[in-house]
Structures are given as structure tokens and as C-alpha cells.
Amino acid sequence: MDQIDLLCKICQCTEAELMTITTLDAVGTAITDAGLAHVPNLTTLDAGGTAITDAGLAHVPNLTTLYAGGTAITDAGLAHVPNLTTLDAWDTAITDAGRKMISDRIKANRRK
């Protein structure tokens, strides 16, 4: 199954509707970085246990919420999602520095 077909199955939508999807629960699926290129308007992504990496986050810059447990996402990937305010990152390579970067963003946004 290719990434578009897989996304349509997960979202229960047509290929044309993928561009409008804002929330994706892909936990434990075969979604990859290439698949995220088809859902660029995501604001919430639950990617736990998938093959998604830092490169995939570059396709979804509007994310505000990311559940990344069990992925290969690192601090470098967090730079691709400047609006991220919620992060669940158990069993990843995201360090305390990455978590602090998100915390600092949240604090800066509260001051605006």
C-alpha cells in the first residue's frame, strides 16, 4: 500500500481531502516521512511507533501538538515545527535541550 492510500485509509477520506486534514492519529502505522508530505496542514500528529523522522517534520510546519513516542525524531526535527507547544517524546532522541526549546517557545508566546 502506498503512502497516499494508507493516509486515506487512516483518515477515511479521499486523496483530494488529504490537504485539508489537520489531525492525524498514525500510531503504529506504516506512515513515513514521505507520507507527511501529503498532509501539510496538520496541526496535531500522533506518530507513536512510526518510522517518521526529523525529515518528515519539515513537511508539517504548522504542527502545534506532536506525540512522538518511539520514533527517530530528534532535537533537530523540532526546528521544523516552530508553532509546536505540546510535545510527548518518550523513547526518542529528543534531549532536555529540545524540551527546553519547546518550553521557551511556549513562554515567549504567552508574553505576546
Image (tube, rainbow, N blue to C red):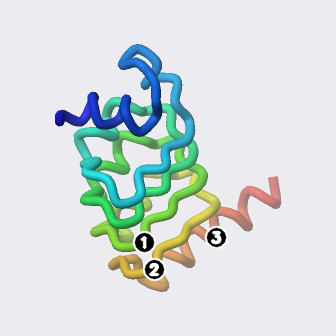
Tell which of 52 and 85 is nearer to you: 52
Few, some or many C-alpha atoms within 10 Å of disc 3 (few <14, some 14-19, many ≥20)? few
Residue type, mark 2 in image? Trp
Camera-nearest label, 3 or 1: 1
Q: Which residue corresponds to mark 3? A: 104
Residue type of the residue flagged with mark 1: Gly
Q: Residue at x 17, y 36 (%)?
A: 1
Mark 3, secondary structure of its residue: helix
Place residue 93 in its image quadrant.
Answer: bottom left
Q: Indicate left or right for 2 with 70 as reference.
A: left
What residue sits right under mark 1 in the picture? 69
Mark 3 or mark 1: name the one nearer the start of the chain: 1
Looking at the image, the residue that sits furthest to the top is 16
Q: Residue at x 42, y 72 (%)?
A: 69
Sort mark 2 into few (<14), some (14-19) or many (20+) by Cα contacts within 10 Å: few
Using the image as rendered, state which of residue 59 and residue 48 is in the foreground.
48
Label 1 CA crowd tier, 10 Å (few <14, some 14–19, many 20+): many
Q: Nearer the viewer, mark 3 or mark 2?
A: 2
Q: Which residue is at the front of the view, 88 or 97?
A: 88
State the CA–CA distance, disc 1 to disc 2. 5 Å
Q: CA distance from mark 3 to mark 1?
A: 21 Å
